[in-house]
């Protein structure tokens, strides 16, 4: 699953919308978390980086992040940044953490995502 800091992750903002920009950001990030596009543990762009890439004020992004944190969808770890929080049942949270650790280790070893997914599928006894 992509890291939110990758160039491909940029929630869209419609300046003509009656929905405030902070709410558009909040729902865009929330939807990416809910649909699995952003996995537990994925690092979010810094407030300044996301503000620059979406063309909104820094305070707008900061408000969206605060509201996502209040909803327990993200967690801020001081100077380390903001990350997608583990969600759901304790079993689901543990599996999300294990999946994130596996994905991070595979990336560190230089294993392609398709190959890493194939290894998991084989370990689970799934047929391609």
Image (spheres, rainbow, N blue to C red):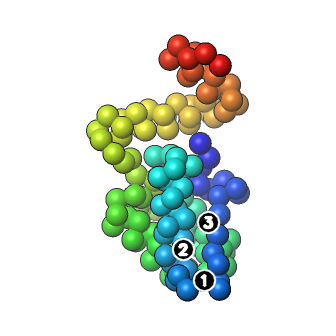
Mark 3, residue position: 11
Look at mark 2 in the image and give the residue it sits on. Answer: 24
Residue 36 horizontal/vertical position (percent): 52, 47
Provide the secondary structure element on which disc 2 rests: helix
**Rendered image quadrant of residue 11:** bottom right
- Element on which disc 1 rests: loop
Q: Compute the Cα span from label 2 to label 3.
A: 8 Å
Q: Residue at x 59, y 55 (%)?
A: 4
Task: Where is residue 128? Give x, y as percent.
Answer: 65, 19
Is residue 64 something that shows in the picture?
yes
Q: Pointer 3: residues within 10 angstroms few (<14), some, or many (20+)?
A: some
Q: Quadrant of residue 110?
A: top right
Above-or-below relation of 122 to 1? above
Q: What secondary structure is found at the residue carrying circle 3?
A: loop
What's the distance in space between the residues labelled 3 and 1, CA to CA? Answer: 14 Å
| Circles 1 and 2 in contact, beta carbons < 8 Å | yes
Residue highlighted by disc 1 = 17
Compared to 90, does 110 lie above or below?
above
* Quadrant of the image containing the N terminus: top right
Q: CA distance from mark 1 to mark 2?
A: 9 Å
Contact between marks 2 and 3 (CB within 8 A): the answer is yes
């Amino acid at each position: 699953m992509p890291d939110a800091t990758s160039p491909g992750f940029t929630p869209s903002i419609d300046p003509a919308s009656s929905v405030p920009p902070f709410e558009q950001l909040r729902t865009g990030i929330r939807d990416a978390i809910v649909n699995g596009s952003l996995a537990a543990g994925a690092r979010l762009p810094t407030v300044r980086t996301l503000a620059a890439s979406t063309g909104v004020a820094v305070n707008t992004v900061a408000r969206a992040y605060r509201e996502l944190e209040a909803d327990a969808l993200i967690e801020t770890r001081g100077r380390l940044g903001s990350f997608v929080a583990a969600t759901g049942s304790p079993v689901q949270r543990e599996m999300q953490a294990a999946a994130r650790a596996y994905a991070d280790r595979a990336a560190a070893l230089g294993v392609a995502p398709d190959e890493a997914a194939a290894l998991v599928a084989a370990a689970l006894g799934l047929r391609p």
